[in-house]
Image (tube, rainbow, N blue to C red):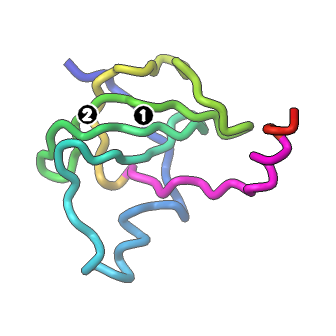
Amino acid sequence: MHKHVDWDDPGADSVIRHFERDPAGYAAPGPGDILSARHEGATVRVRVEAYVEGTSIGEVVALISADNGRRMKSHGKLALGDTVRLPDASRALEPQRDPREDDSEARG
């Protein structure tokens, strides 16, 4: 059984909106594809197991903090390994991070 998730509105990062300009680049997701969405501000990556009528069903494989880009095992009621339904309308492009932030973390 899947866990119900109230996905954040992807706004300007909407995958659907992005591909409206270039419909030739859009393809329906398939098994094994990794999709992204937002939930309570965090980035959620979902590995697709099935795709039915505009909705992907899959496993949460990553939860990434919006504040610092660090990975989490859980976020709110969502945890790694949960099975979720992700409608195309909720899919979001990955947020772009400043590479200098990664350098400063590495230096300690």
Residue at the image position 18 percent from the left and 36 percent from the top: 49
Residue at the image position 48 percent from the left and 17 percent from the top: 77
Residue at the image position 85 percent from the left and 44 percent from the top: 104
Which one is in front in this view, the residue at disc 2 or the one at disc 1? Answer: 2
Label at residue 6: 1
Task: Judge left or right: residue 85 versus residue 93.
Answer: left
Tell which of 86 and 67 is nearer to you.
67
Residue 48 image-quadrant placement: top left
Quadrant of image for the N terminus: top left
Tell which of 94 and 11 is nearer to you.
94
Image coordinates for residue 76, horizontal then vertical, percent: 54, 19
Mark 2 is on which residue type?
Gly
Label at residue 99: none
Quadrant of image for the C terminus: top right
Question: Label 1: how many residues lie within 10 Å, few (<14), some (14-19) or many (20+)?
Answer: few
Residue at the image position 30 percent from the left and 38 percent from the top: 47
Magenta segment, which residues?
90-104
Q: In this view, does 34 lie above or below 65?
A: below
> Which residue in the rendered view is the most extreme toward the front?
107
Task: Judge left or right: residue 40 versus residue 102.
Answer: left
Q: Is residue 21 magenta?
A: no
First in sequence: mark 2 or mark 1? 1
Image coordinates for residue 91, horizontal then vertical, percent: 39, 52
Residue named by callout 2: 58
